[in-house]
Amino acid sequence: MSRIANTANERQTPADKAMRQEPASVSSFAGQQGEATHLKVAIVHDWLVGGGAERVVLELHRMFPDAPIYTSYAKKEWREKLDGKVVTGFLQYWPLSMLRKFLPLLRIWWFTHLDLSRYDLVISSSGNGEAKGIKTGPNTTHICYCHTPTHFYWRHYSHYVKQPGFGFFDPVARLGLKVLVGPLRRWDLKAAQRPDYFIANSSHISSDIKKYYGRDSMVINPPVDTKRFSSAEKTNRQGFVTVGRQKPYKRTDLIVEACTKLNLPLTVVGSGPDHKKLTRLAGPTIKFVTKANDKDVENYLASAEAFLFAAHEDFGVTPVEAMAAGTPVIAYKAGGALDYVIPGKTGEFFDKQTVGSLIKALESFKSEKYDPKEIQSHAKKFDAEQFRQKLSDFINSVIS
């Protein structure tokens, strides 16, 4: 693996100071021939609040520990996790965090006014935000790690118009999306032409990048801490489990209804705007756990017959975590799950996002035919170490 090391700091530019920039980093990176290549590196991310995309940023930080991390907003915990390297703008200081989600035009303004021309390498981690739209200089290599073409504008536009997911602010969000989707799509498409290279987090997203942006991309799956789950305490596997934020697009309602109709034990770990709806749908075999610590989650995954996953997800880290615990996955046959579910070996698919389709899969599922060690071995292909290796190799291939 390429060796990333901290070697020096360089002088701030006036523009950087205006953006609350910390000293820019210079990292030592082993080039294609193995020689040390000194690179001025910057990392850019949409926002840092928590989730799978933030895990990518954390691994980028471990690869380039001195690189500043530009973002529109960051929670305190992520500033600490990223060792104070986070650089934010005026949106950081807005009093109501919810309002930041309504302000794509201001985020566009902020990201496009960053001066990153003095960096040799800029890595943007971008999904439902604007980080990929940064402008760089002629001597800068810009690699975009794309979690998804923006859901609100493209693949899931109709879903978000029906269910914006902002609670009390839904009518405002719905109106704003309908009015602004045209110009925002045009900007998003234009912004997608700025990176020199695209990396997709799954084969599904690679196809979407081609479909919506007209760009080719390489697939490097996001990092998963498989070691954490491989050591979870194994007990007699009983019942089913699902873990995650309870939002409409996650379709946890299908899982709850299917297990209720079949009278199957199910543990639902997590909370979110759909929680009350789910409890109304649930029968006596459904158990809800809204406050689970990391160890609890590990044990729930390790003790289940299977992990149930009904979302059309860009990748889906939690199902891979379940596999790392030796647990097979029953997933909707779409999105990122196509990259890691192997029918008959690591889990099974159900073909339609309906209760009936999931019931059919559950009725034919036999947990005893799966080998936990084989599932764990497959999960290791998605480990954080593999992510760093593949990304390092890719950077070597484009930096001379």
Image: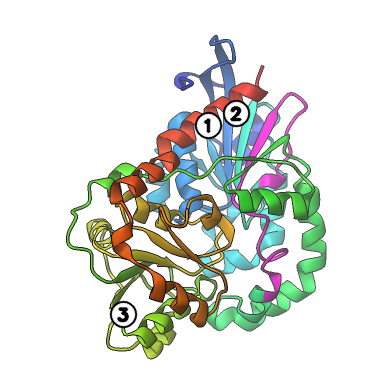
In this orientation, does residue 62 appear?
Answer: yes
In x, y percent, where is residue 284? Answer: 27, 88
Mark sitting on residue 181: none
Q: Is residue 288 above or below residue 319?
A: below
Which residue is at 53% across, 53% downward?
Answer: 73
The quadrant of the rendering that contains the C terminus is top right
- Distance of mark 2 from mark 1, alpha carbons? 6 Å
Q: Is residue 382 left or right of residue 214?
A: left
Foreground pick, 36 / 148: 148
In x, y percent, where is residue 295? Answer: 23, 56
Q: Which residue is mark 2?
A: 394
Start-end of magenta stretch: 132-158
Element type at mark 1: helix
Element type at mark 2: helix
Mark sitting on residue 390: 1
Around disc 2, counting alpha carbons within 10 Å, would you say few (fewer than 14), some (14 to 19), or many (20 or more)? some
